[in-house]
Amino acid sequence: MIADVMREAKNRMNGAITSLESDLAAFRTGRASTKLIEHLKVEQYGVEMQLIQMAVISVPEPQQLAIRPFDRSSMSAIEKAIMKSDLGIMPNNDGQVIRLNIPRLTEERRRDLSRIVGRRIEEAKVAVRNVRRDLNHDLKELKEEKLVSEDECARGEKQLQEITDSYITQIDEIGRAKEAEIMEV
């Protein structure tokens, strides 16, 4: 019973970390990365699709992304999606490939991104703590239903807190690494 609760805790907390990593991967750091645009929603023929499903995205130069659509008729829809996004990058279309030149980040923009990263880090910590709260509640219900003893419940709560602490530490490390990457000139 307790082992099942701990397994569920690890699975759900891993989900929070995975979500955080995918969120942070999309942050611009002055270097071109396909993760910056691959999940961008593009509407074509009345259907919304992710850009990665519509084109090949590559990094031909450190400061440039190249988008080669599978269907050339989707180029204008891709351009519109890029312009509507909050990337702040103008696409260059040569009829075959859409190129995005990634500008260097200003000091002010780096600080703004760092604050946003801090908020995302805090949201991930809250998600992990919510998992702990939910599972602590489950442990107490198991104790009330006499499926586990008080000692087992107390050990389970302690173990759950240790798991939570390890995931919080992991989130902090991810945040520090991303902030250092953003502030890097």
Image: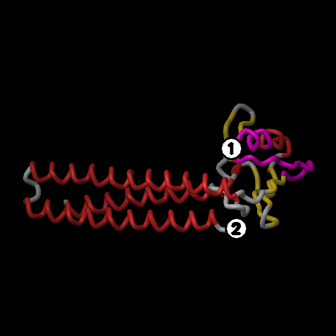
Q: Residue at x 15, y 48 (%)?
A: 141
| Label placed on residue 185 | 2
Q: Residue furthest front?
A: 108
Toward the viewer: 105 or 66?
105
* Label 2 or label 1, whichever comes before in sequence order: 1
Residue occupied by mark 1: 86
| Label placed on residue 98 | none
Q: Residue at x 77, y 57 (%)?
A: 102
Toward the viewer: 91 or 43?
91
Percent coordinates x, y for residue 83 in the rendering: 76, 41
Residue range in magenta is 79-98
Toward the viewer: 19 or 178?
178
Secondary structure under tag 2 reads loop
Percent coordinates x, y for residue 49 in the rendering: 67, 42
82 up-or-down from 62: above or below: above
**In the image, is residue 86 part of the stretch drawn in magenta?**
yes
Q: Residue at x 69, y 52 (%)?
A: 37
The quarter of the picture where the N terminus appears is bottom left
